[in-house]
Amino acid sequence: MQNFDRLHRLVAEALGTGLLVATVVGSGIMAESLTKDVALQLLCNTLPTGAILVVLITILGPISGAHFNPAVTLAFTANRTFALSDALPYIAAQIVGGICGAVLAHAMFELPLIAFSLKPRTGLSQWLAEAVATFGLLATILGGLRFNASNVPWLVGLYITAAYWFTSSTSFANPAVAIARSFSNTFSGIRPIDLPGFIIAQLLGAALGAIVLTWLLQSQRQGTDTMNERINS
């Protein structure tokens, strides 16, 4: 990541978020065209999303860090592991890239390029689900980076695949993706009016995840240091 200038990193963030959204929206459209079974539609939406995350994080992570998510960018910024001056440009690139991804998916399936969603996604249970989903995503990323950084692409892909099914919201866990999905009146859409609740829940979940995992991982290191000191003495 240090070998790439800001422009390259921003393009990588926009491209990665765009391809992620194109996969989420496109696979949802394909699923609706193939079956009327909602469970199968969700499965058809889940597997490509988890798979593309593995690919995108692997190939674009070395360029930009593969955030593809404002919640992740803000968490890294708060942890002082990411430059504050890059945070807003990253978030802007993610949002623009995500919207372009939704438009691209519509174009591939000969749908109107922009069609604001009419699909309701709101209520305390779904907001809680989004907070839990984003908490888990941050835990997966931070824990993975601490203990097995090379496997982070797989860890994130597998986590999102699982979270699609154990959360009532189907785990958006990403403000940029949520915004982009509001531009699509398809299987994966969300009404624009429902965005604030989702985004607030995602940011709160990310903040809590960053706080808890930072404490947990620091405690692990401090405990190891104390044990080593006792052994050496």
Image (tube, rainbow, N blue to C red):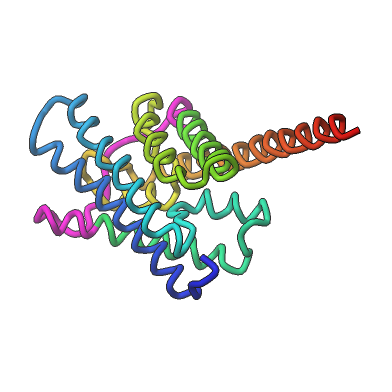
Please name whichever residue, 207 or 117, is drawn nearer the observer in this view of the structure: 207
Is 7 placed above or below 97 here? below
Q: Can you give x and y, in whole percent of width and height, for residue 151 in the image?
A: 45, 43
Residue in the image at 15% along x and 37% along y: 31
On screen, residue 208 versus residue 38, left or right, reads right
Residue 117 belongs to magenta span: yes
Please name whichever residue, 213 or 133, is drawn nearer the observer in this view of the structure: 213
Q: Can you give x and y, in whole percent of width and height, for residue 106 in the image?
A: 17, 55
Residue in the image at 81% along x and 30% along y: 227
Quadrant of the rendered image containing residue 2: bottom right
The residue segment tinted magenta is 103-127
Residue in the image at 20% along x and 43% along y: 27
Residue in the image at 34% along x and 63% along y: 15
Residue 36 belongs to magenta span: no
The residue furthest front is 232
Q: Can you give x and y, in whole percent of width and height, for residue 26 in the image?
A: 20, 48
Q: Can you give x and y, in whole percent of width and height, for residue 206 in the image?
A: 56, 41
Q: Main secondary structure of the magenta part?
A: loop
